[in-house]
Image (tube, rainbow, N blue to C red):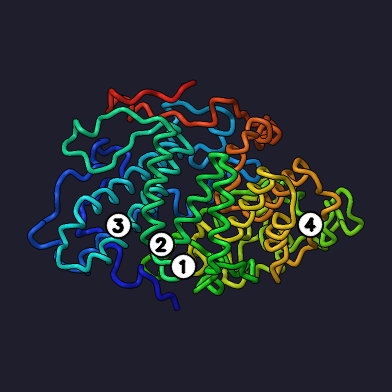
Amino acid sequence: MKTRMINTITLIAAISWLLVISVSCNKDYLERHPLDNISSETFWTNENDVNMALLGCYRRMDGSFLSFLRAYFEGLSDAGLAYWGFYGFEDNYKMGIISPESGGGKDDLYRTSYQGIAQCNFFLDNVDKATSVDPAIITRAKAEARFLRALFYFDLANCFGDVIIYQTTPENPDAAKIAKSPKADVLKFIHDDLDFAIANLPDEQYTKGHAVKGSALGLKTRVLITEQKWTETVATAQEIIDSGKFSIYNDYEGMFLNRGQENNPEIMFSCQYLSPDRYPSYYGYNIEYAKHIFLLKKLKDAFECTDGLPISESPLYNPANTFANRDPRHNYIIRNPQGTDWPGHYTYDFYDVTGVQNRKYIDPEIPGDYANNFRQDWDYILIRYADILLMYAEAKNEMSGPDQDVYKAINAVRQRTSVNMPPVDQARYNTQEKLREYIRHERFVEFPMEGIRYFDLKRWHIAHIEIPKQSNLSGVPYVFEEKHYLWPFSQFEMDANPNLVQTVGY
């Protein structure tokens, strides 16, 4: 049974105490900025008030792209597609049809990220009013809120580049209508938040939903590698490795289901759920039943055979049975088309689009109906130790080329008990260039459906090369131009804020 922060009080009760920010696209732009204090005389008086208000900050993850919705980013990458144009990721974004008027995922990410930022700012602006609470508790709570704010801002920086920085709650509607800041300043703001979080969060394993020091170090590692600051990335990842607080979990499949998530040493931060009130039904319904996301053959073919060779070279590869003798992650991530391991689930050809259906985060032992699989409460992992090891390997290779520490980090991911692939062939991958491509391959097959591939392609600056190699369902190649590395602001945002300047190229 889960014993999480989410289990302490209901999320609805927590939000009811806070100024709720509208989630409707039709509401006024300024509603995402809470401009009024809730009753100061009756709130912010004890530790329970602080915890309740902090829970409201965590609550903002659900419904944003820091929840199961993050899986839809797979539809923007070269690993999958979002069928029916969900969020515009298939029929618009990947066909290059993205504009201030196009709506969809870009508008939702912008809106929900700023709602989360506003919730965190509201908390940070007011938490010091709880003067009866132990200052150490207040400081930790501030560190958690600033970690969450950094999460939201990092998504904004990755998708839009230059964005508006709100360090505090705007005093009035006009005060919210300010200019955006350069991406470099946004990243500095993120680092400031993360450094505060690292200094003030407990140095312990992540177990109960609250961010810990390792959570903040993990996000900082991801920010640094996106900035291509190789030396700093290696140092930050090394701090996580040396802490001994996290390790590779042996059950790859179970890590994404309830059976493997409680006190899992690999999970460093996640969006958490708890049945019966909080469950990611949107993921269950749209991924398993309606199947809005499909994987592409490119991903299926990327998994090596059990001898460590690609399918184009391995004598073990059998085109008549592509599930045999493959990297076990292939079978954990891709659904068997024969349906033998899916009792009670919908048939394989239900909304089959690419012939490659996702299995990750779905338990084949639970019947695929709305009352069962769709209401499970396993958590969506946002940061895990395998990513730290592969970012460490990547940055160290970029910094100084192949060495035993780089190979060791890659092998730790490849050789978890339930995967147990052969170690990296050091004779074959013996140069910086060759090992760079192999690390990228390893990330490709390790992280499907985790919202990572799209951002990897962008930070490597190869999205404009790799994505157009794939085609839509009609065989028309996808489009990714230089300007598509960033998204445009919606026309609605532009009209509401005369100081907001549109992204270059739109």
Which residue occupies the extreme left position in the image? Answer: 41
* Residue at 21% in and 57% down: 127
Q: Quadrant of residue 335?
A: bottom right
| 356 vs 427, nearest the viewer | 427
Looking at the image, can residue 155 be seen?
Answer: yes
Disc 3 secondary structure class: helix
Residue 13 seen anywhere in this rendered image of the structure: no
* Disc marking residue 248: none
Circle 3 residues within 10 Å: few <14, some 14–19, many ≥20: many
> The residue under label 2 is which amino acid type?
Ala
Asked whether disc 4 touches disc 3, contact meaning CB atoms under 8 Å apart, the reply is no
Could you tell me which secondary element the residue under label 2 belongs to?
loop
Label 1 sits on residue: 206
Label ID, residue 142: 3
Give residue 424's mark: 4
Per the model, the C-alpha gap separating discs 3 and 1 is 17 Å
Depth order, front residue of 79/206 = 206
Residue highlighted by disc 2: 211
Name the element at disc 4: loop
Residue drawn at (52%, 69%) of the image: 245
Q: Are marks 2 and 1 in contact (CB under 8 Å)?
A: yes
With 199 as the anchor, is 31 left or right in this view?
Answer: left
Residue at (50% x, 45% y) in the render:
223
Earlier in the chain: of badge 2 and badge 1, it is: 1
* Mark 4 to mark 3 CA distance (whole Å): 43 Å
Q: Amino acid at mark 3?
A: Lys
Q: Label 1: how many residues lie within 10 Å, few (<14), some (14-19) or many (20+)?
A: many
